[in-house]
Amino acid sequence: MWIKQRGNKFGYKIILTIYQIIGYRGAKGAIWLVSLFYALITKDERKAMYDYYTKIGVSGGFFYYVSHLNQFSLSLFDRFVTRIDPDIFEIERVNINSFMDKDNNRILALAHIGNWANTFVAFRYENRTIHITADDKLKASIVEYESSLKHKNSSSINIINLKEGLKASIEIVHALQAGEDVAIMVDRLVDPKRFVEIEFLDTPTKFNKNPFEIAYNRNVDMVGVTVIRTGDKQYKLIFSDPIKVDKSRQKEEAIAIMAQKYSDYLEDILKQYPKQWFNFYNFWEHECK
């Protein structure tokens, strides 16, 4: 079952008001208390995370879970702060050559690992247009509030709302035809019948098939991209090596190979940053049943 979305527009307005009055450090203290509170009341989510901790190979007890929640809360907080003050954040780019080939567009593969919503900040100095697909689980009031905040350097970023169905599909095709990049979420199924099964953390796992199929059909490379919070106002943008389409193989086989390469890239990141996993529900039970 999906984790119930907690929090609301009013709560985030309070946190941002605290930030504007007493600064980043003061808001960070308030967020830790909120994380502790939610750790106490989210028993089902805590149990699901213990399963993840076992798979990733860490000894995660209650206070590890509190710290994990705090990492998520700080990333969400940063998501809103970047709409106000994006220039206060430092971005380290890893393996950026995978992205910098301006003669080719690509599909950027995203997952709920790290602060994916801050992708637009990480790309703010790149002279190219990026379309980010989103089926945001935040409540409508939070999304509305986030959209009302000032976005600096956001002219090169376009959000494609997957809930708009056919319109979203047309936007994706048009973007690729125009030689622009499209970022698509991979780790959650949009349609339970459209999946590709791979090995992820030594467990059979179903990923969203759509981005890999689009890459195959359009014959464009895929590049995994993850935005990791490494400290206060510090992020690391990590690119995978280009994931090539192999047209010499049958479609389903080629898609499975691409998906496994992306899965291996995610595993490497999680082994370095296990608290950056932000699927707070029983991921394997939900996606793989």
Image: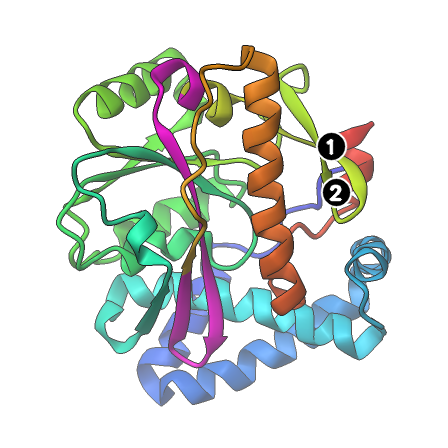
Which range is magenta? 215-237
Name the quadrant containing residue 272: bottom right
Name the quadrant containing residue 71: bottom right
Amino acid type, mark 1: Glu
Instruction: State the residue position of label 2.
Output: 283
| Residue 287 badge | 1
Q: Position of residue 227 (x, y in %)?
A: 44, 59
Q: Quadrant of the N terminus?
A: top right
Amino acid type, mark 2: Phe
Residue 21, compared with residue 124, is above or below; it is below
Q: For this rendering, which residue is in front, 205 or 139?
A: 205
Q: Position of residue 49 (x, y in %)?
A: 79, 58
Q: Residue drawn at (21%, 32%), measured in percent from left and top?
A: 180
Q: For this rendering, which residue is in front, 282 or 2?
A: 282
Q: Residue drawn at (21%, 56%), measured in percent from left and top?
A: 151
Name the quadrant containing residue 35: bottom right
